[in-house]
Image (cartoon, helix red, strand yellow):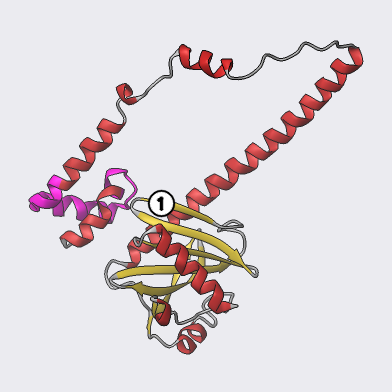
Amino acid sequence: MTCNEAEILLHAFLDGELDAGHAREIEGHVATCPRCAAALRVYGELRAAMSRSDLRYVAPDSLRARINGMFPAATPRASNRWTLFNSFMLGSALSATAAASLMFAVVRSDQDQMIAGELVSAHLRSLQAERLIDVHTSDQHTVRPWFNGKVDIAPPVVDLAAQGFTLVGGRLDFIDGRAVAAIVYRRGGHVINLFVTQGSSFGRGSTLKTMHGFNVKLWSEQGLYFGAISDINADELQEFEEKFEAATR
């Protein structure tokens, strides 16, 4: 294992997210590499420092009093049983709606977080042991039919070299226990893995997350679900999505 490969995996190793094989490789590497051992030690110290309780700040009561003083006091209103009953019913309805919305948001957030974690793992796997590409070509008309019979969809494949994102090939991968198409692009020296599937695993709408130093962009389009991951910055990954969608339309 090289230092460049180890550097990608150090955070995941520290968080206990690597499989046993990669964890052993990291342990063996840092045991003989002072540079990576020092980096791992710094990351551990930073993580411990950020979890200290004395870093938390509790706002003083005077701040609450100042904020309350900025708003006029509520004017008392006469009430009767009917008003109280309506208020109770309205409050119950609002509470139920809020609870349902919160539950949906929590479930959606958890699902996105899980998928983002799967994409990070698949991205890291692809960078190891020459597993990045099964069909190596910049010809979109070769990459797309290569997936025939391997996945249940015909993934859109476009060459975005003129827009700064070079198509380099594709491979078969697995996310959330199902086979997905992985289309590989490069932005300079950076790899972009674009995963394409059918179904609701990736969720609906568009979200951007950062996990373990990688940016993950999830979106859906015309019944297909996309997940792009790379270590390029968030603006560049957003640009990639926009250029890809424009080309597929």
SS class, disc 1: strand
Q: Nearer the viewer, residue 155 or 129?
A: 155
Rendered residue at 73%/35% (across/down): 97
> Residue 106: image x %, image y %?
58, 41
Q: Nearer the viewer, residue 128 or 3?
A: 3
> Residue 162: image x %, image y %?
41, 82
Rendered residue at 51%/69% (across/down): 242
> Which residue matches tag 1?
210
Q: Could one spot residue 145 in this view of the protein? A: yes
Q: Is residue 118 above or below residue 78?
A: below
* Residue 51 in the figure: left or right of residue 44: right
* Residue 154 in the figure: left or right of residue 40: right
**How many numbered marks have been drawn onto this rendered protein structure?**
1
> Residue 79: image x %, image y %?
86, 11
Q: Could one spot residue 228 in this view of the protein? A: no
Is 24 within the magenta? yes
Q: Nearer the viewer, residue 187 or 33?
A: 187
In which image quadrant can residue 171 be found?
bottom left
Main secondary structure found in the magenta portion: helix
Part of the protein shown in magenta: 12-38
Q: Amino acid at mark 1?
A: Thr
- Which class describes the residues within 10 Å of circle 1: few (<14), some (14-19), or many (20+)? some
Q: Is residue 155 above or below residue 113?
A: below
In which image quadrant can residue 38 be found?
top left
In which image quadrant can residue 220 be found?
bottom right
* Residue 41 in the figure: left or right of residue 231: left
